[in-house]
């Protein structure tokens, strides 16, 4: 009798007549039968693993739906290979919907695809020194107990660990691993630990990683040596990101793979894309801030601000052409308003109501947010002046240029207006004391004379606002640098 499991061609166990089984019946084969529903003995376990080793030797690695038993004897382990067999899977290994009822160790090479989709590990599982040379997938997998991936290489893009289930999970450890892996759409709490792991090709988009532990991990490094998340690389043009030890060719290749698998076609990144990566940078920042690693937290803060700036650039605003047409029509109406009112008062009222409604509709549908424009301007200044409080030298340079620039303009203006009793030294001192609090201009009579000139008075007012803002950014940059 054939196994009742769909698609299985193995012979069902039938009636087990030995004394230990007590005449129990099983209509499934040794691979698919539920080991908890009849008396499973050491003898059956030996037979099961002998058949597994036989399938491995024949390169028949279809283990889909198999229920893998453990050993009733402590310290007894079974594996997939004979003693002298080369420890590698050379063809596609399919463990989809399989169940491991006891602790299991994988310590060999997967030369072809490795499919662990919807696999259940009911006890500890260890992947030690494994190399996944092609596609691998752990999506939907159930993990329990202790999960350890150590010294593993993922050489090809993977189905990742999305939608994994963590029933009775004690600890999930990723140690000294590298490769292109996705931990997307997950909640990674304090049980998840990434140690000495290369995160340069790992995606965490849509995941909650506030409480996960990242110890001595490496990231991609940007132009200013700040850390860059791989999720940013996937959505941005590689030309825009200058990443060290990550070639333009690699970035293009990853971008193309991402488009083929996710977007299906090349589309420009939207504000929503940047908002998702911004949220991810913010989570990494808070994660390292909580652990008092302020240096790393500051680097992710730079990424957060840059993603916010890119997001605001792409906010869906009303088009320039629409604004031009509307403003032109309104201007034409206003210019001829008397003639129109005298000739067609009802028409004018109708036109005004129509344009008012149209403008409101455009305002709402295109999300015309003037606050976003203001925020974008502020963020651009924030980035250019102090690199998001990351560069006190840049902020100090801007402050000095403002002092010299305003002073030079004031000196030229005074000379043009034939106020010749002011020297360059006076103007430099005057501009410096107006820019930096707690400094007093020595020549009070000259200061009074200069402040009586309206243009100079207004320029001093603007100067105090601008240089005060830059001085604040300089102070915050210094604070951030010393905190690191």
Image: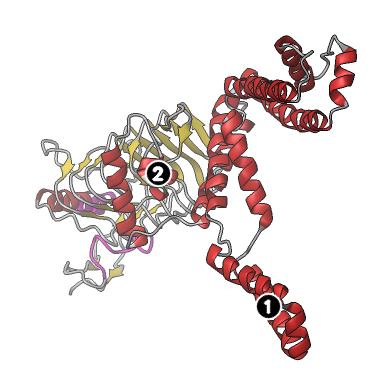
Please tell me how crowded label 1 is: few (under 14), some (14-19), or many (20+) other residues with Cα within 10 Å.
some
Q: Secondary structure at mark 2?
A: helix
Q: Secondary structure at mark 1?
A: helix
Residue toward you, 259 or 60: 259
Please tell me how crowded label 2 is: few (under 14), some (14-19), or many (20+) other residues with Cα within 10 Å.
many
Is disc 1 in contact with disc 2, using a CB cutoff of under 8 Å? no
Image location (x, y in percent) of residue 185: 49, 54
Residue at 26 percent of width and 68 percent of height: 28
Residue toward you, 437 or 185: 437
Residue segment shown in magenta: 27-48
Q: Which residue, given by chain and number where applicable, does mark 2 sit on?
A: 233
The N terminus - image quarter: bottom left
Left or right: where 361 falls relative to 309: right
Image location (x, y in percent) of residue 253: 27, 46
Image location (x, y in percent) of residue 44: 25, 54
Q: Is residue 369 magenta?
A: no
Image location (x, y in percent) of residue 183: 43, 48
The C terminus - image quarter: top right
Q: CA distance from mark 1 to mark 2?
A: 43 Å
Mark 1 against mark 2, which lies toward the viewer?
Answer: 1
Q: Is residue 43 magenta?
A: yes
Residue 85 is drawn in which quadrant? top left
Residue toward you, 154 or 5: 154
Among the two numbered marks 1 and 2 on one chain, the one whose residue lies closer to the N terminus: 2
Residue at 64 percent of width and 32 percent of height: 290
Q: Is residue 126 above or below residue 330?
A: above
Q: Which residue, given by chain and number where applicable, does mark 1 sit on?
A: 355
- In this orientation, does residue 280 appear? yes
Left or right: where 277 falls relative to 174: right
- In this orientation, does residue 117 appear? no
- Main secondary-structure element of the magenta-colored stretch: loop
Q: Which mark is residue 196?
A: none
């Amino acid at each position: 009798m054939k196994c009742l499991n769909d698609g299985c061609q193995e012979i069902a166990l039938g009636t087990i007549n030995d004394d230990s089984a007590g005449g129990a019946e099983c209509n499934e084969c040794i691979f698919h039968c539920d080991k908890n529903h009849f008396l499973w003995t050491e003898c059956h376990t030996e037979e099961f693993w002998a058949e597994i080793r036989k399938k491995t030797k024949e390169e028949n690695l279809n283990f889909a739906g198999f229920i893998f038993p453990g050993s009733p004897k402590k310290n007894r382990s079974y594996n997939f290979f004979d003693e002298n067999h080369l420890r590698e899977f050379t063809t596609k290994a399919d463990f989809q919907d399989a169940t491991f009822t006891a602790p299991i160790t994988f310590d060999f090479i997967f030369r072809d695809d490795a499919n662990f989709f919807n696999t259940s590990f009911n006890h500890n599982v260890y992947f030690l020194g494994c190399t996944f040379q092609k596609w691998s997938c752990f999506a939907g997998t159930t993990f329990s107990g202790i999960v350890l991936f150590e010294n593993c290489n993922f050489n090809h893009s993977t189905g990742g660990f999305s939608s994994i289930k963590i029933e009775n999970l004690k600890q999930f450890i990723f140690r000294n691993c590298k490769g292109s892996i996705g931990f997307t759409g997950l909640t990674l709490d304090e049980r998840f630990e990434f140690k000495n792991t290369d995160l340069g090709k790992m995606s965490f988009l849509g995941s909650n990683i506030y409480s996960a532990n990242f110890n001595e991990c490496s990231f991609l490094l940007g132009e200013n040596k700040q850390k860059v998340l791989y999720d940013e690389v996937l959505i941005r043009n590689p030309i825009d990101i200058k990443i060290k030890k990550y070639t333009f060719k690699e970035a293009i290749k990853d971008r193309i793979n991402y488009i083929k698998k996710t977007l299906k076609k090349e589309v420009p990144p939207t504000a929503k894309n940047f908002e998702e990566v911004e949220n991810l940078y913010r989570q990494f920042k808070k994660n390292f801030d909580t652990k008092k690693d302020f240096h790393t937290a500051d680097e992710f803060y730079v990424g957060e601000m840059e993603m916010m700036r890119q997001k605001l650039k792409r906010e869906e605003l009303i088009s320039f052409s629409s604004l031009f047409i509307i403003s032109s029509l309104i201007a034409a109406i206003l210019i001829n308003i008397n003639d129109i009112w005298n000739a067609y008062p009802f028409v004018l009222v109708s036109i005004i109501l129509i344009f008012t409604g149209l403008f409101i509709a455009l305002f709402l549908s295109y999300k015309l947010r003037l606050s976003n424009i203001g925020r974008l301007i502020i963020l651009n200044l924030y980035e250019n002046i102090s690199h998001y409080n990351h560069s006190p030298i840049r902020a100090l340079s801007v402050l000095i240029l403002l002092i010299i620039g305003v002073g030079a303009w004031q000196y030229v203006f005074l000379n043009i207006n034939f106020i010749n009793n002011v020297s360059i030294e006076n103007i430099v001192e005057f501009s410096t004391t107006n820019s930096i609090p707690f400094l007093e201009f020595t020549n009070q009579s000259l200061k009074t004379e200069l402040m009586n000139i309206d243009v100079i008075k207004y320029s001093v007012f603007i100067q105090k606002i601008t240089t005060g803002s830059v001085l604040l950014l300089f102070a915050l940059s210094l604070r951030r640098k010393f905190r690191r």
